[in-house]
């Protein structure tokens, strides 16, 4: 029987390999982690290892304080960001960080992504938030740790629930997504990149394009996620 750690490593490996398959990463950019909240640990991609060289055995087991529990390689440089989010958000077990093209471009503008259409509304009723840039003090401190708090603070300031809004742009940096599983977090990363691309094209066609009206936002979100949802089998 496989150990819990081995299962986490295999889950994290499979999720990480989806990033290049979905054109969400270049070279060694980006990472996925898969957590077990009951055990208080997660498996994450090792730092700087090309995707073509990754194996399940390469994945590093880390606790929610950022300490390496099992693995011979250094974990991702973003490990402490993942650790902070898992420690405070008890209902997620997957996190993705990429530098995907369009989502990162939006992050660099320091703008939220407006909700222009129903594809966006299928996944959230809000504009995709962009967290404010870090202060000099935060940058000079524990940078990755502070990134996690930057993400949490941005949602809190907007009155957003992390279980309803599963994606964010970190200002001047890039996107993070999360979910109840690593697979869902990868799905959210692909969705975010698609939404960011469509929003960019929408503004190219019409700079003053209107925000989607509330009736359509509510309809499209609730038919997939509401108490009387009817999307899917």
Image (cartoon, rainbow, N blue to C red):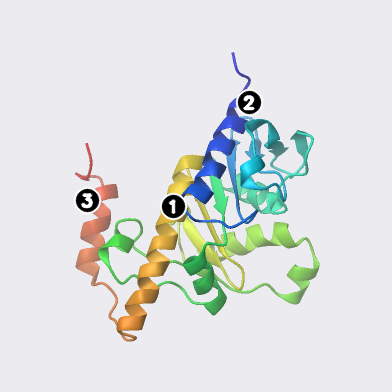
Q: Secondary structure at mark 3?
A: helix
Label 2 sits on residue: 6
Using the image, determine if residue 91 lies above or below residue 138: above
Using the image, determine if residue 208 lies above or below residue 114: below
Label 1 sits on residue: 188
Q: Which mark is residue 61?
A: none
Q: Earlier in the sequence, mark 1 or mark 2?
A: 2
149 lies left or right of 158: right
Q: Secondary structure at mark 2?
A: helix
In this view, the residue in front, 22 or 138, is 22
The x and y percentages for residue 131 are 56, 69
In this view, the residue in front, 116 or 12, is 12
The x and y percentages for residue 47 are 72, 48
213 lies left or right of 32: left
Identified at 58% across, 31% down, the residue is 10
Label 3 sits on residue: 223
């Amino acid at each position: 029987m496989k150990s819990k750690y081995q299962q986490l490593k295999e889950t994290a490996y499979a999720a990480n390999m989806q990033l290049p398959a979905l054109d969400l990463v270049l070279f060694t950019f980006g990472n996925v982690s898969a957590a077990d909240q009951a055990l208080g640990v997660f498996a994450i991609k090792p730092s700087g290892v090309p995707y073509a060289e990754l194996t399940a055995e390469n994945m590093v087991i880390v606790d929610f304080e950022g300490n390496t529990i099992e693995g011979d390689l250094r974990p991702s440089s973003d490990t402490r960001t993942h650790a902070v989010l898992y420690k405070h958000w008890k209902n997620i077990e997957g996190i993705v960080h990429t530098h995907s093209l369009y989502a990162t471009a939006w992050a660099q503008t320091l703008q939220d992504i407006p909700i222009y259409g129903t594809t966006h509304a299928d996944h959230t009723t809000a504009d995709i938030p962009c967290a404010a840039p870090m202060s000099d003090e935060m940058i000079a401190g524990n940078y990755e740790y502070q990134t996690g708090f930057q993400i949490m603070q941005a949602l809190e300031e907007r009155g957003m629930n992390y279980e309803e809004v599963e994606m964010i742009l970190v200002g001047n940096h890039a996107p993070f997504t999360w979910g109840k599983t690593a697979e869902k977090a990868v799905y959210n990363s692909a969705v975010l990149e698609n939404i960011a691309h469509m929003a960019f094209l929408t503004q190219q066609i019409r700079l003053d394009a209107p925000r989607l009206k509330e009736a359509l936002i509510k309809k499209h979100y609730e038919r997939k996620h509401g108490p009387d949802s009817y999307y899917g089998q």
